[in-house]
């Protein structure tokens, strides 16, 4: 036994927590004892610095987003000093310091790149709610979670408001839009709408839509029940929206040839237009773990590029003279890269599609340069490119799940040729599909559960039945239809594509209907995902003691997730909703606003619908005057037109009264009143079992995207 170590006492088998503690202690002691020559290990690891670079860059980006306030002069001076120190150690220091120095410099670059990106997209954000005319140019058409058509406008004008306050972009949900209204990119439209700033988090520490809206330059959300008037047609000289108009026309043509939701999904796969996909279809795709097929992702980009690559390469191989004289593999890679780029242009080039294109472009470029197309280095290059240009992508589930799955698949690609020797050749394609589905599902399951609160248990089965059809029928027929469309011969290919998509939807519907298809998990604490990501990356790249410590960190993060507790009391921003944890789960004072209610239940790991949660034991009383008991006092939620009249009657006995409007100026009573004025400064509130309060505003900090209020006193 090594000097200074001591034998661990025996752990009784009936004490599981003590067994876990003993395991962690054993691993940590073994890790520290096995450090050996740490400087030598660092010096050997520097040859793989490119693989470590995305982790360092991502850590710097993550640091920027976790700051409580925007960086000031002191932060910039410290960053420059660290960068200078790292650069000096990289150039002049001993070999063992080269890798840590390079990673330090990359971390600083990541933080500064994120700050620059946040500053570069700055645009006005609406400061308070208004009702009035709004006009602008349609640049995006989609559908909300409630199957309502939505328009995103730029070149926004708000007549009657100071021009300096006009947002760069606004999104309008069309409730009760006329059936004859056919939105088209480039149309200039006008309507009368209720506009408000982007909403803050549904609770302290939850996903902050304002941050996403900031980077999308989306300064106002609105809804309208009024008609939408077209005031100007699209400008033919506007090439910026030419691809969008072509995409929507192509989507409409595909949906005309392929009826129902099969046509809507087929159009989404080829054009990125998901406006015709209903929420019911989205639900079954999520429940079956096939939702990644609805949006254009690395899977579709890879299938399209792979089909074009294989078709060109094997087609040229049949022409003997060409095959003997020309580099057919490189020609196929070049043509596939052009096809992937056209697909990027046609499909709208959103961040998810750009991420997919970067990965495919790096891999095809590796073929052109006689390098391995599928390696961790190509994945690292793609991650670096995306993080440098769009640092905010790091926080999204798409980026996290895509690179986690790709990294895992690259890792199993290396031993697969050795494993497949023991498998009959007829079963190898099936075994490969099962293995890839299993591995991708395992590594993305924690990310999906953390973001969406759900785990799909039959995802492997669904992918086993759907992915081959997607790769053999749907995507190839889509490419073939695009090639035959100019000749007017696309109908047979579209028919086959529709049949393949219908099969995928049938599989999703069947799997989603199986008993236990999904289970719910409570949201993890904020540190869990970053620790898991850094620890998993370190475990992949490191060796010896550092890998052991990374595995310990993964276990600690998992335990932290498992023992986390949810707030006892939640109050939505502006006092719109109250949720109190009870024996059946969280009881809601009412079912609306449904978005906030759904997010609370999802974070609780609760599968109940908002209407069900509103019927739970906890709150009682008539609509608009709901009462419960909390911390030995009354908890009252007053809403609607009678709220102010009821306030004096319930404000007694040290009650906590939540009011969804403004309390009368100077109102006093024997209670604590949380009205819209008070909660405009705090945002959503959370209270633990001991009554300790946390506010969304305090947790979010003073950032660029939190500068606008969520409501203002009249």
Image: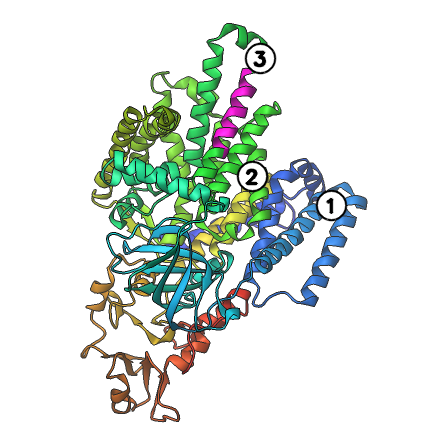
Disc 2 marks which residue?
A: 382
Q: Is residue 310 left or right of residue 85?
A: left
Q: Is residue 208 visible?
A: no
Q: Residue furthest top?
A: 321
Q: At 53% across and 70% down in the image, what residue appears?
A: 164
In front: 546, or 291?
Answer: 291
Does the magenta stretch mainly form a helix, a strand or a loop? helix
Under tag 2, what secondary structure? helix
In front: 83, or 164?
Answer: 164
Q: Residues within 10 Å of mark 2 (few under 14, many from 20)?
A: many
| Residue 482 spot, x, y in % from top left | 38, 29
Disc 1 marks which residue?
A: 97
- Which image quadrant for residue 146? bottom left
Under tag 1, what secondary structure? helix
Q: CA distance from mark 3 to mark 1?
A: 46 Å
Earlier sequence position, callout 1 versus callout 2: 1
> Which stretch appears magenta?
328-341
Disc 3 marks which residue?
A: 326
Residue 403 sits inside the magenta stretch: no
Earlier sequence position, callout 2 versus callout 3: 3
């Amino acid at each position: 036994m090594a000097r200074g170590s001591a034998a661990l006492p025996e752990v009784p088998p009936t004490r599981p927590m003590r067994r876990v503690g003993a395991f962690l202690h054993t691993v940590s002691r073994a890790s520290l004892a096995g450090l050996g020559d740490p400087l030598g290990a660092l010096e050997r690891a520097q040859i793989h610095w490119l693989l470590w670079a995305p982790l360092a860059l991502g850590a710097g980006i993550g640091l920027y987003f976790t700051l409580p306030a925007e960086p000031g002069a002191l932060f910039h001076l410290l960053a420059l000093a660290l960068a200078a120190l790292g650069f000096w150690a990289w150039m002049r220091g001993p070999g063992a310091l080269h890798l840590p120095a390079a990673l330090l410099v990359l971390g600083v670059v990541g933080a500064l790149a994120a700050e620059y990106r946040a500053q570069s997209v700055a645009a006005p954000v609406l400061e308070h709610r208004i009702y009035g005319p709004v006009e602008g140019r349609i640049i995006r058409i989609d559908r909300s979670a409630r199957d309502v058509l939505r328009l995103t406008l730029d070149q926004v004008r708000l007549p009657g408001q100071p021009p300096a306050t006009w947002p760069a972009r606004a999104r309008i949900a069309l409730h009760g839009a006329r059936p004859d209204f056919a939105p088209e990119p480039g149309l200039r439209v006008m309507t009368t709408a209720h506009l408000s700033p982007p909403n803050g988090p549904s609770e302290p520490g939850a996903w902050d839509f304002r941050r996403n809206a900031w980077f999308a330059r989306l300064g106002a959300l609105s809804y309208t029940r009024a008609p939408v008037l077209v005031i100007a047609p699209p400008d033919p000289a506007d090439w910026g929206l030419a691809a969008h108009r072509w995409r929507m026309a192509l989507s409409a043509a595909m949906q005309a040839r392929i009826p129902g939701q099969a046509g809507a999904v087929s159009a989404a796969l080829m054009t990125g237009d998901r406006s015709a996909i209903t929420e019911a279809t989205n639900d079954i795709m999520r429940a079956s773990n096939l939702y990644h097929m609805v949006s254009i992702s690395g899977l579709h980009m890879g299938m399209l590029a792979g089909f074009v690559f294989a078709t060109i390469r094997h087609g040229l191989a049949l022409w003997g003279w060409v095959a003997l004289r020309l580099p057919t593999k490189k020609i196929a890679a070049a043509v596939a890269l052009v096809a992937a780029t056209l697909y990027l242009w046609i499909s709208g080039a959103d961040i998810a599609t750009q991420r997919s294109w970067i990965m495919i472009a790096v891999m095809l470029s590796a073929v052109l340069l006689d390098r391995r197309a599928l390696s961790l280095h190509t994945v690292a290059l793609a991650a670096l490119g995306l993080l440098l240009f769009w640092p905010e992508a790091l926080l999204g589930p798409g980026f996290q799940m895509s690179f986690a799955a790709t990294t895992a698949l690259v890792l199993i690609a290396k031993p697969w040729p050795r494993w497949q020797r023991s498998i009959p050749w007829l079963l190898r394609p099936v075994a490969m599909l099962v293995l890839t589905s299993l591995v991708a599902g395992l590594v993305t399951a924690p990310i999906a559960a953390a973001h969406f609160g759900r785990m799909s248990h039959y995802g492997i089965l669904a992918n086993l039945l759907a992915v081959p059809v997607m790769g053999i029928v749907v995507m190839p027929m889509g490419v073939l239809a695009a090639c035959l469309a100019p000749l007017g011969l696309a109908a047979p290919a579209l028919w086959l594509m529709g049949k393949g998509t219908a099969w995928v939807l049938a599989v999703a519907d069947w799997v989603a209907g199986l008993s236990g298809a999904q289970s719910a998990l409570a949201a993890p604490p904020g540190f869990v995902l970053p620790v898991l990501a850094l620890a998993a990356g370190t475990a992949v790249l490191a060796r010896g003691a550092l890998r052991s410590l990374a595995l310990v960190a993964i276990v600690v993060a998992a335990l932290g997730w498992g023992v986390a507790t949810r707030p006892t009391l939640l109050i939505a921003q502006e006092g719109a909703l109250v949720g109190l944890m009870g024996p059946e789960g969280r009881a809601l004072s009412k079912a609306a606003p449904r978005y906030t209610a759904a997010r609370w239940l999802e974070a609780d790991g609760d599968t109940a619908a908002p209407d069900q949660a509103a019927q739970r034991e906890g709150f009682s009383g008539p609509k608009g005057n709901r009462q419960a008991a909390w911390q030995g006092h009354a908890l009252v939620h007053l809403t609607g037109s009678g709220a102010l009249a009821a306030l004096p009657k319930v404000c007694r006995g040290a009650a906590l009264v939540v009011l969804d409007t403004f309390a009368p100026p100077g109102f006093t009573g024997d209670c604590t009143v949380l009205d819209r004025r008070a909660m405009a400064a705090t945002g959503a509130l959370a209270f633990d079992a001991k009554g300790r309060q946390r506010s969304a505003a305090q947790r979010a900090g003073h950032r660029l995207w939190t500068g606008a209020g969520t409501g203002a006193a009249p």
